[in-house]
Image (tube, helix red, strand yellow):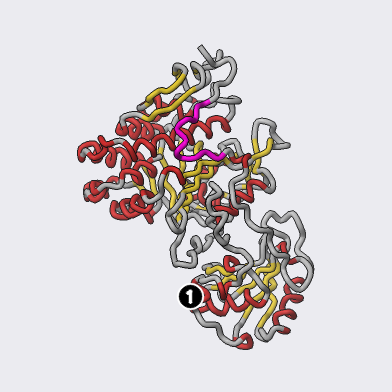
């Protein structure tokens, strides 16, 4: 939310130097899996992926007064709101994917910063996603998202209860709509306390926080309804900034800037006012009609009927569209999707610009990763040696098999140094791999071919099916220009 405010305002007040000292930072990624950054498009433009985190920390009087739950005072915070914001490479559109806090996932190993940083071991089973924040901070939430989605995350922004209130006060109110009178309060005292009459309402301050926290009273009374309400709020807020002339007032803008900076924790890549300003200018390029809010498609967990898990197929389709920079609103359908059948050499990717050496002079290490990332299948025995033989047959006589195993869903070629990009692309081209299968990585010593689950047999990997061109209906896409959206009220919570 703070990010949207900064991005849509985009005024010179962000250069006020006294704000620099107020910016709070934390590590970007505490996991072991450090993905290379988002891939540039054919014109050298790079998308941005920013994880927005809402913390329920009750670590001070303001947060405790607003958050309630005395038994959780000063306890470990939970990441109760998690939204991945994807800004397209050409800045034409923005996609937001929410993960409900009740989602069960496997937690990665997370190591807190510092020479003696505490190590949080990877979970053996499924854990509720909002617990990631208590495993070292927002950097573990970032690591969990990257492990699940394969999406490289460039930045994060985190806000707590008091931040939501101060931001909403600075805005001057956000229009929302409810289909009936609503009061979020159960007989035993649970609920956010939100009380609104039927129709359009302008909310701010604590009432805005209540809206964003309401589950009892919205739709089916679960976190899924709450996520939909949060999308409505953020879209409405973005529209307000675009049309509200009062924001040309320097005093108003300064109060917004101060509220945003005071409310946020960001990664080190955003810890300067000029960096935030530059980012806001990029975000401002996207019209509200090209903003698409979605919720990760889900199924009820077979282990806990009160929890959900990513829906097989459709959740991955949504993640893939973000990875390949395909707009969720379907307006990219006429474009050539990233990672389609074109080869790296023809794609205009950075690797294509670096000339390749003759195959016989390219050292290639082959690693067996045919079990997949989830480890559901055992690696095919001897698969690395089989692929080495294929490489030698194609002229790559320096190819060798790596004794290390791994797990990849799709076959990829990773390289360590920029000057190896052309050689890595030549290896990929030899097997018809797509452009996005060539990746720079700090985790490999040289050019390494990871034989994925898509290449368990045969002389060539199984080509991936075409990427979707529009978000699945199960993701409940909501367009940023939809000012008629109105929350359905749960039975029993009207007055």
212 lies left or right of 427:
left
Q: Is residue 484 magenta?
A: yes
Q: Which residues are magenta?
A: 477-487
- What residue is disc 1 on? 418
Point out residue 63 in the picture as x, y percentages from the top left corner.
Answer: 39, 30
Question: Residue 157, relative to residue 437: is it above or below?
Answer: above
Q: Quadrant of the N terminus?
A: top left
Residue 116 visible (yes or no): no
Judge the density around disc 1: few (<14), some (14-19), many (≥20) Cα neighbours within 10 Å.
Answer: few
Question: Residue 25 appears at what percent x and percent y?
Answer: 37, 49
How many numbered dots are placed on residues in this image? Answer: 1
Element type where label 1 sits in the image:
helix
Residue 378 left/right relative to 166: right
Q: Residue at left 66%, top 84%?
A: 396
Whether 113 is among the magenta residues is no
Main SS of residues in magenta: loop
Kindly identify the residue that appears in the image at 48 percent across and 51 percent down.
Answer: 86
Q: Is residue 213 visible?
A: yes
Q: Residue at x 64, y 34 (%)?
A: 307
312 up-or-down from 71: above or below = below
Q: Residue placed farthest to the front in the image? A: 334
Q: Quadrant of residue 460?
A: bottom right
Residue 77 percent coordinates (x, y):
48, 37
Q: Residue furthest top?
A: 495
Name the spot of residue 242 as percent of width and height, x first.
34, 40
Please indicate whether residue 316 sits to the left or right of residue 92 in the image. right
């Amino acid at each position: 939310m703070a990010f949207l405010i900064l991005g849509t305002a985009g005024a010179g007040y962000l250069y006020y130097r006294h704000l620099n000292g107020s910016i709070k930072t934390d590590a970007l990624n505490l996991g072991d899996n450090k993905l290379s950054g988002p891939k540039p498009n054919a014109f050298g433009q790079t998308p941005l992926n920013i994880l927005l985190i809402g913390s329920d920390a009750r670590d001070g009087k303001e947060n405790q007064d607003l958050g309630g739950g005395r038994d959780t005072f000063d306890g470990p915070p939970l990441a109760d709101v998690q939204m991945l914001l994807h800004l397209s490479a050409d800045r034409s559109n923005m996609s937001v994917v929410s993960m409900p806090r009740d989602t069960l996932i496997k937690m990665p190993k997370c190591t807190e910063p510092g020479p003696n940083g505490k190590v949080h071991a990877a979970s053996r089973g499924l854990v509720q996603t909002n617990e990631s924040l208590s495993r070292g901070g927002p950097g573990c939430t970032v690591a969990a998202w990257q492990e699940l989605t394969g999406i490289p995350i460039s930045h994060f922004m985190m806000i707590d209860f008091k931040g939501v209130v101060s931001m909403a006060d600075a805005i001057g109110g956000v229009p929302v709509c409810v289909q009936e009178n609503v009061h979020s309060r159960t007989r035993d005292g649970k609920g956010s306390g939100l009380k609104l009459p039927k129709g359009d309402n302008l909310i701010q301050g604590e009432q805005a926080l209540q809206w964003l926290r309401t589950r009892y009273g919205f739709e089916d009374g679960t976190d899924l309804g709450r996520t939909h309400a949060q999308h409505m709020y953020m879209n409405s807020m973005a529209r307000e900034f675009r049309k509200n002339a009062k924001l040309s007032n320097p005093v108003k803008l300064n109060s917004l800037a101060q509220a945003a900076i005071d409310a946020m924790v960001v990664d080190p890549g955003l810890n300067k006012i000029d960096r935030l300003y530059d980012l806001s200018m990029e975000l401002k390029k996207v019209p509200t009609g090209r903003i698409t809010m979605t919720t990760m498609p889900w199924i009820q967990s077979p282990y806990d009927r009160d929890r959900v898990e990513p829906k097989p197929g459709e959740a991955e389709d949504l993640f893939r569209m973000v990875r390949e920079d395909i707009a969720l609103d379907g307006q990219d359908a006429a474009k050539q999707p990233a990672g389609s059948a074109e080869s790296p050499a023809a794609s205009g990717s950075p690797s294509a610009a670096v000339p390749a050496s003759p195959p016989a002079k390219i050292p290639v290490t082959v690693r067996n990763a045919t079990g997949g990332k989830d480890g559901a299948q055992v690696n095919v025995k001897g698969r690395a040696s089989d692929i080495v033989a294929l490489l030698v047959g194609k002229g790559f006589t320096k190819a060798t098999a790596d004794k290390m195993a791994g797990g990849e869903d799709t076959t990829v070629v990773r390289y360590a140094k920029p000057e190896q990009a052309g050689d890595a692309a030549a290896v990929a081209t030899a097997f018809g791999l797509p452009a996005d299968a060539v990746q720079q990585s700090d985790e490999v010593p040289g050019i390494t071919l990871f034989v994925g689950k898509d290449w368990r047999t045969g002389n060539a990997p199984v080509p991936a099916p075409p990427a979707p061109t529009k978000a699945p209906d199960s993701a409940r896409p909501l367009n940023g220009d939809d000012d008629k959206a109105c929350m359905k009220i749960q039975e029993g919570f009207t007055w």
